[in-house]
Image (cartoon, helix red, strand yellow):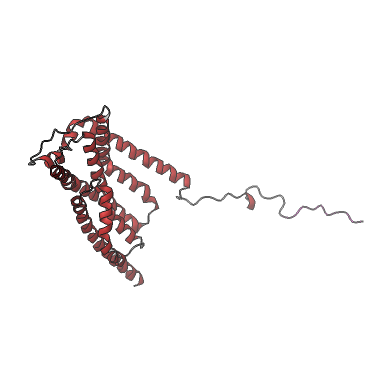
């Protein structure tokens, strides 16, 4: 009877400094962020935006009376030169003044903190962009601020006074005496200024979609004849007034911005074609 062979294998014992296949930890690619890291960055972006908005609200609160008087210009312009008795802005409820303060802080705080919010958002999205996309990040943020400023300015100096004057004219036609509360005036002003400022962002959105090759200049040209209906619908949402003058005043600059978006889309497509030709050469 043969004895069993108890000779250990040649590779026994395993080398201590040699990792076993089943115990090797897969290292994460260097520089790649995890899902939790992205959530942490998003949390800090929202936190910094909130701090910027809070600081802007505090600044508005310090000069609240002066800011309130400044925002009364559309009302004063609308009632000037009209043969109608206006008792000024009144308050008919105990908490009405707090509604006014809320509208002042909301509108002023958002407008002042918007550049900082755009900067923080740019910091958040920049790590996930390639070199070509990074070149468009700064112009996109700058364009968003400029478009908001143009929309808010247009609403403050043209759209809101026109809406108020239209209300006065129709009140005169029907023999009514307008009696406006401060809360209703500042609420209307805040809604229209912020709403039109945000509505003016649509050409930038269209250009981004063209840059991502989701839309094309040909599609924008094909939709041009329907765009006026869309702008009138946007006007119905942004402007709570129901007079046709306000709708037309808002649809006119938005139609112009749509034409600018078409021109910009053509330039983006030409740049893309030139870049592709250079790569082929």
Part of the protein shown in magenta = 1-10
Q: At which x and y percent is residue 206?
A: 30, 58
Q: The N terminus is located in which quarter? A: bottom right
Q: Could you tell me which residue is drawn at 56 percent across and 51 percent down?
A: 26
Q: Could you tell me which residue is drawn at 36 percent across and 72 percent down?
A: 280
As drawn, the residue found furthest toward the right would be 1
Observer able to see residue 267: no
Q: At which x and y percent is residue 179?
A: 18, 35
Q: Is residue 12 above or below residue 190?
A: below
Q: Is residue 20 above or below residue 101?
A: below
The picture quadrant where one finds residue 88 is: top left
Q: At which x and y percent is residue 145?
A: 25, 48
Q: Could you tell me which residue is drawn at 40 percent across and 41 percent down?
A: 43
Which sits in the foreground, 4 or 203? 203
As drawn, the residue found furthest toward the top would be 94
The picture quadrant where one finds residue 227 is: bottom left
Observer able to see residue 47: yes
Which sits in the foreground, 107 or 48? 107
Magenta segment's dominant SS is: loop
Q: At which x and y percent is residue 22?
A: 64, 51
Based on the picture, tell me whether residue 242 belongs to the magenta stretch: no
Based on the picture, tell me whether residue 6 belongs to the magenta stretch: yes
Residue 6 relative to residue 20: left or right:
right
């Amino acid at each position: 009877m043969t004895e069993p062979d108890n000779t250990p294998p040649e590779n026994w014992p395993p080398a201590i400094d040699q990792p076993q296949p089943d115990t090797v930890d897969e290292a994460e690619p260097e520089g790649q962020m995890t899902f939790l890291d992205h959530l942490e960055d998003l949390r800090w972006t929202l936190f910094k935006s909130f701090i910027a908005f809070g600081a802007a609200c505090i600044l508005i609160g310090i000069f609240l009376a002066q800011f309130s008087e400044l925002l009364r210009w559309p009302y004063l312009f609308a009632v000037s030169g009209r043969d109608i008795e206006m008792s000024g802005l009144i308050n008919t409820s105990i908490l009405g003044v707090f509604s006014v303060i809320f509208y002042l802080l909301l509108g002023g705080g958002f407008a002042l903190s918007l550049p900082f919010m755009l900067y923080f958002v740019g910091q958040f999205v920049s790590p996930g962009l390639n070199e070509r996309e990074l070149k468009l990040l700064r112009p996109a943020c700058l364009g968003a601020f400029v478009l908001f400023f143009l929309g808010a300015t247009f609403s403050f100096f043209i759209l809101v006074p026109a809406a108020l004057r239209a209300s006065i004219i129709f009140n005169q036609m029907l023999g009514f005496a307008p009696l406006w509360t401060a809360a209703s005036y500042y609420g209307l002003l805040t809604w229209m200024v912020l709403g039109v400022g945000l509505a003016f962002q649509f050409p930038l959105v269209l250009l981004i979609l063209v840059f991502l090759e989701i839309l094309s200049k040909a599609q924008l040209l094909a939709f041009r004849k329907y765009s006026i209906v869309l702008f009138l619908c946007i006007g119905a949402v942004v402007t709570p007034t129901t007079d046709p003058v306000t709708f037309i005043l808002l649809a006119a600059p938005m139609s112009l911005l749509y034409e600018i978006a078409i021109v910009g889309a053509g330039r983006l497509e030409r740049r893309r074609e030139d870049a592709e030709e250079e790569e082929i050469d």
